[in-house]
Image (tube, rainbow, N blue to C red):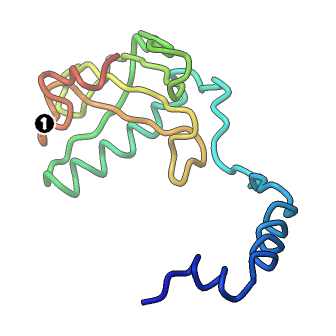
């Protein structure tokens, strides 16, 4: 195996090595490439609590009829109010937390806890809504008692 330094000295190519290193030194410094960033801007413009109710109504009916083979529907809402807006640091995704009383088709009034999330819809298009009806969280996604759906 040859020693590179010894080979260069014997060949008298120290000038060639110096020229090659000089070429590298003369190259411009590397610069960062700026790519445009796409996606949500999170301006804190979140719709009011009432804006989430139609979504909850349709998704509740779909979940009950499809997964639980239940005829339950939400027929009316009352006492809709905000419980928190951006309850954590301001750098988090903006959310408006709300609570409402829902009249269900079985004649019972149940509490609904929900949040409206800025740019939380499909592919960050539009606001997203996460919700839980107390007493009807059959898959325990927000258990206990829909506590995980609250701030």
Instruction: Name the quadrant containing residue 83.
Output: top left
Quadrant in which the C terminus appears = top left
Q: Is residue 11 above or below residue 36?
A: below
Give residue 101's position: percent from left, percent from top: 32, 17
Give residue 74's position: percent from left, percent from top: 31, 34
- Residue visible at 39% across and 45% down? 58
Which sits in the foreground, 69 or 34? 34
Which sits in the foreground, 72 or 87? 87
Instruction: Name the quadrant containing residue 41.
Output: top right
Give residue 127's position: percent from left, percent from top: 55, 38
Residue count near mark 1 (Cα–Cα under 10 Å), binned few <14, some 14–19, many ≥20: few
Give residue 76's position: percent from left, percent from top: 37, 26
Residue that protrudes farthest toward the front in the picture: 10
Q: Is residue 27 above or below residue 50?
A: below
- Residue visible at 50% across and 32% down? 117
Query: SS at mark 1?
Result: loop
Q: Which residue is mark 1?
A: 140
Which sits in the foreground, 141 or 62? 141
- Residue visible at 19% across and 37% down? 141
Left or right of 9: which side holds 80? left
């Amino acid at each position: 195996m040859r020693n590179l330094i010894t080979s260069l000295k014997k060949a008298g190519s120290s000038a060639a090595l110096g020229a090659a290193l000089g070429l590298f030194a003369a190259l411009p410094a590397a610069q960062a490439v700026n790519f445009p960033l796409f996606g949500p801007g999170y301006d804190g413009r979140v719709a009011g609590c009432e804006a989430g109710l139609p979504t909850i109504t349709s998704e509740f009916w779909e979940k009950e009829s499809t997964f639980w083979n239940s005829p339950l529907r939400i027929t009316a809402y009352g006492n809709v109010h905000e419980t928190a807006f951006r309850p954590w640091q301001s750098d988090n995704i903006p959310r408006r937390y709300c609570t409402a009383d829902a009249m269900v088709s079985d004649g019972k009034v149940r509490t609904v806890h929900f949040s409206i999330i800025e740019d939380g819809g499909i592919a960050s298009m539009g606001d997203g809504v996460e919700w839980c009806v107390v007493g009807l969280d059959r898959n325990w996604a927000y258990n206990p008692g829909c506590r995980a759906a609250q701030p």
